Amino acid sequence: MMLGLPRSTDVRQQISKKAVYDRFNLSAGERNRFDADIHKMFIVNEISSKTINIAEGESIKRIFVVDIQLQADRYNPKNIILLNDLIDQKMLFALRTEKQCRLAIVNGRLIEGPWKDPNEIGIELRGLNLDAVWDNIVIDVGDITVEEGKTLDEQLARDFDTFTSSLRSLHGIR
């Protein structure tokens, strides 16, 4: 899976399920739920100043692209968040089934893009440093429009508040 990224970013490092189980001390039930969702996981790209000509950010030094081969297109989002917590780096997840793919990231909460044909999935690295590149990946994956004068984090908080207010209204909750 290339996502349109330069070859210089290519890595192929499998993430073992045992490492996930051991790191988070998962119960047998949690392991079974994880296995029911996820077949295999690989770090496939490293976006960093070592692999492309973009400066490190103030807070972001590298971004990993993680290819997750799902058992089916329905999965528990908690498993993706768990994987995000495994490695202390920013990660872009490519969630794949046999026929489709979607991009996802965790930026305070899980943000998922739409399911698409794997050949239609790609990302563009835009920004002068990795902080800006990350923000643009978040914007692209979540199809987010940042209002003038707002930061991405402010926009995400506002959009989340609007979303939860809409849900409360829909269900008659104050």
Image (cartoon, rainbow, N blue to C red):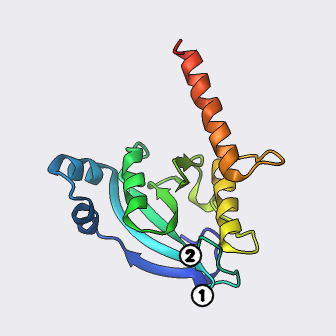
Q: Secondary structure at mark 2?
A: strand
Q: Position of residue 98 (x, y in %)?
A: 44, 55
Identify the residue at the far top of this view.
172
Residue depicted at 66% across the width and 68% down the height? 131
Residue depicted at 64% across the width and 48% down the height? 142
Q: Quadrant of the C terminus?
A: top right
Q: Which residue is mark 1?
A: 50
Q: Is residue 105 left or right of residue 15?
A: right
- Label 2: few (<14), some or many (≥20) within 10 Å? many
Q: Position of residue 30 (x, y in %)?
A: 23, 48
Determine the CA span between mark 1 and mark 2: 9 Å
Q: Is residue 68 left or right of residue 33?
A: right
Q: Position of residue 161 (x, y in %)?
A: 62, 33
Determine contact: label 1, label 2, CB under 8 Å: yes
Mark 1: amino acid: Lys
Q: Which residue is mark 2?
A: 62
Numbered mark located on residue 141 in the image: none
Q: Secondary structure at mark 1?
A: loop
Mark 2: amino acid: Arg
In this rendering, the answer to whether 33 lies above or below 59 is: above
Residue depicted at 65% across the width and 74% down the height? 57
Q: How many marks?
A: 2
In this rendering, the answer to whether 137 lies above or below 125 is: above
Closer-to-camera residue (161/33): 161
Residue depicted at 22% across the width and 65% down the height? 22
- Label 1: few (<14), some or many (≥20) within 10 Å? some
Q: Quadrant of residue 46?
A: bottom right
Q: Is residue 48 left or right of residue 41?
A: right
Identify the residue at the far left of this view.
28
In this rendering, the answer to whether 20 lies above or below 76 is: below
